[in-house]
Image (cartoon, helix red, strand yellow):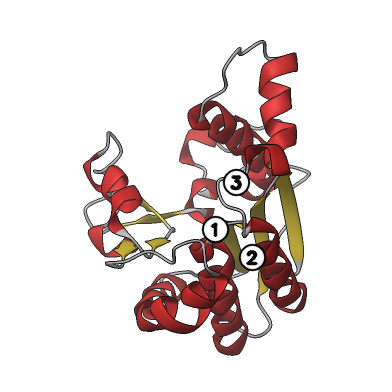
């Protein structure tokens, strides 16, 4: 129980910030997964957490953006953005008091830069006054998977300056160094990097997810 409140924390509804309760009592995350190629989303569809997500919230295209901002923003991404915005709209309708959106994407890839920029623009049009927070992976020269990452980053940054209210920048190289030097992981994998990022995001959103004197909105 919370001190002085007499309320049983087990009955707290604060978890409903990020989860929607279905008619059967199942709690489904208020999240939409999007990628322009299917392989990454298929890992979620077939992975150990596949029962957690609604199939309609996992959206994937047929061909990727090939590390090209323009493909993610103007061609391949444009074909899928209406479906994504419609799905986000349905999730927004299920909220009692929508505060805003959290966008997770990279700045180096074609989908992460191009499509995320396009989606942010559309969210600004459809949900103008709602806050948009983004957690972004910024590319680092020593860990680059493509030579065009700096170009994608500059183009995406230009768009996001207009459409994002707050950015949490995760530098790939810095996270890699943290895993190596502070956590003594000899060869950090993407799983190690992702877990560290999820710890940061967990801390950022703690005040949204739990009742208490620090309970704040977006």
Identify the residue under disc 3. Answer: 209
Are there few (<14), some (14-19), or many (20+) residues within 10 Å of tag 3?
some
Secondary structure under tag 1 reads loop
Identify the residue under disc 1. Answer: 109
- Distance from the alpha carbon under mark 3 to that under mark 1: 30 Å
Asked if labels 1 and 3 touch by Cβ distance under 8 angstroms, the answer is no
Asked if labels 2 and 1 touch by Cβ distance under 8 angstroms, the answer is yes
Q: In this view of the protein, can residue 85 be seen by the observer?
A: no
Q: Earlier in the sequence, mark 1 or mark 2?
A: 1
Rendered view: 205 above or below 4: below
Q: In this view of the protein, can residue 43 be seen by the observer?
A: yes
Q: Earlier in the sequence, mark 3 or mark 2?
A: 2
Rendered view: 189 above or below 109: above
- Distance from the alpha carbon under mark 3 to that under mark 2: 33 Å
* Location of residue 65 in the rendering, given as x and y in whole percent from the top left corner: 44, 67
Q: The C terminus lies in which quarter of the figure? A: bottom right
- Distance from the alpha carbon under mark 1 to that under mark 2: 7 Å
- At 32% from the left and 52% from the top, the residue drawn is 41
Query: Residue farthest to the front?
Result: 147
Identify the residue under disc 2. Answer: 152
């Amino acid at each position: 129980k919370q001190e002085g409140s007499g309320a049983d924390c087990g009955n707290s509804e604060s978890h409903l910030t990020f989860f929607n309760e279905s008619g059967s009592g199942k709690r489904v995350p208020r999240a939409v997964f999007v990628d322009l190629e299917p392989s990454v989303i298929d890992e979620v569809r077939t992975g150990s957490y596949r029962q957690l997500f609604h199939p309609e919230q996992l959206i994937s295209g047929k061909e990727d953006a090939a590390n090209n901002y323009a493909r993610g923003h103007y061609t391949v991404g444009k074909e899928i953005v209406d479906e994504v915005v419609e799905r986000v709209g349905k999730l927004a309708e299920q909220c009692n008091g929508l505060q805003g959106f959290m966008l997770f994407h990279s700045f180096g890839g074609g989908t992460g830069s191009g499509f995320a920029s396009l989606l942010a623009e559309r969210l600004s049009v459809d949900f103008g006054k709602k806050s948009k927070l983004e957690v972004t992976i910024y590319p680092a020269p020593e860990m680059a998977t493509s030579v065009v990452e700096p170009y994608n980053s500059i183009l995406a940054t230009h768009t996001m300056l207009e459409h994002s209210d707050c950015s949490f920048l995760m530098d790939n190289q810095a996270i890699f160094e943290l895993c190596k030097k502070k956590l003594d992981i000899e060869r950090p994998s993407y799983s190690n990097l992702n877990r560290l990022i999820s710890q940061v995001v967990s801390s950022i959103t703690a005040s949204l997810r739990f009742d208490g004197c620090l309970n704040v909105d977006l």
